[in-house]
Image (cartoon, helix red, strand yellow):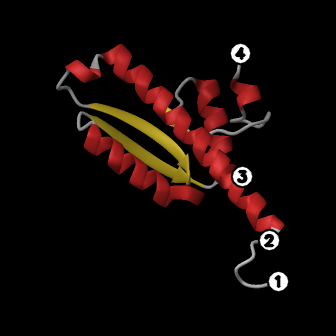
Amino acid sequence: MTAEEPTIESETTMRKTKALFGLALGCVVLALGAVSASAGVSRSKDVVTLNATLVNTVQNAWEQTIQTFEEKYPNIHINATYLDSTSLATLIGTQLQAGNAPDIFTGGPGVGPTGIATLAP
């Protein structure tokens, strides 16, 4: 195998990372759309701050995404906290049960504490 040939394991990891990032980004877009619609953000000069708890494995990508978003929508500020996936899952599960979850958080497929199957009604 040459250095340029990806392994099956690295391709699988890359696909999982891209899928997770895509899912999380989709959640952010949906959450921000809902906030914009309900708060009339597009017509308002008021600053809205959203709290986000995000996985730290792709923190650089999140920071770039948030910066780009805030440049496009200067009246929306995202206050991001980054955690490892285990801590994030535990914290989000606890916060959801207590009714004080962040506005935006990363989740994933399946039935874990932040899994879509768990969060669906």
User: Which quadrant does the N terminus fall into?
Assistant: bottom right
Residue type at numbered disc 1: Met
Residue 45, x across and y down, in percent: 17, 26
Which residue, given by chain and number where applicable, does mark 3 sit on? 16
In front of the other: label 4 or label 1? Answer: 1
First-in-chain label (4 vs 2): 2
- Say if mark 3 contacts mark 2, CB within 8 Å: no
Which residue, given by chain and number where applicable, does mark 4 sit on? 121
Neighbour class for label 3 at 10 Å: few (<14), some, many (≥20)? Answer: few
Give the CA separation, mark 4 to mark 2. 39 Å
Residue type at numbered disc 2: Thr
Which residue, given by chain and number where applicable, does mark 2 sit on? 7
First-in-chain label (1 vs 2): 1
**Which residue ends up furthest to the bottom in the rendered image?**
2
Residue nearest the observer in this picture, 95 or 51: 51
Give the CA separation, mark 1 to mark 2. 9 Å
* SS for callout 1: loop
Q: Residue at x 51, y 52 (%)?
A: 82
- Say if mark 1 contacts mark 2, CB within 8 Å: yes
In front of the other: label 1 or label 3? Answer: 1
Q: Residue at x 27, y 36 (%)?
A: 73
Which residue, given by chain and number where applicable, does mark 1 sit on? 1
Give the CA separation, mark 4 to mark 3. 25 Å
In front of the other: label 4 or label 3? Answer: 3
Residue 59 shown left or right of residue 45 in the figure: right
Residue 71, x across and y down, in percent: 26, 45
Give the CA separation, mark 3 to mark 2. 14 Å
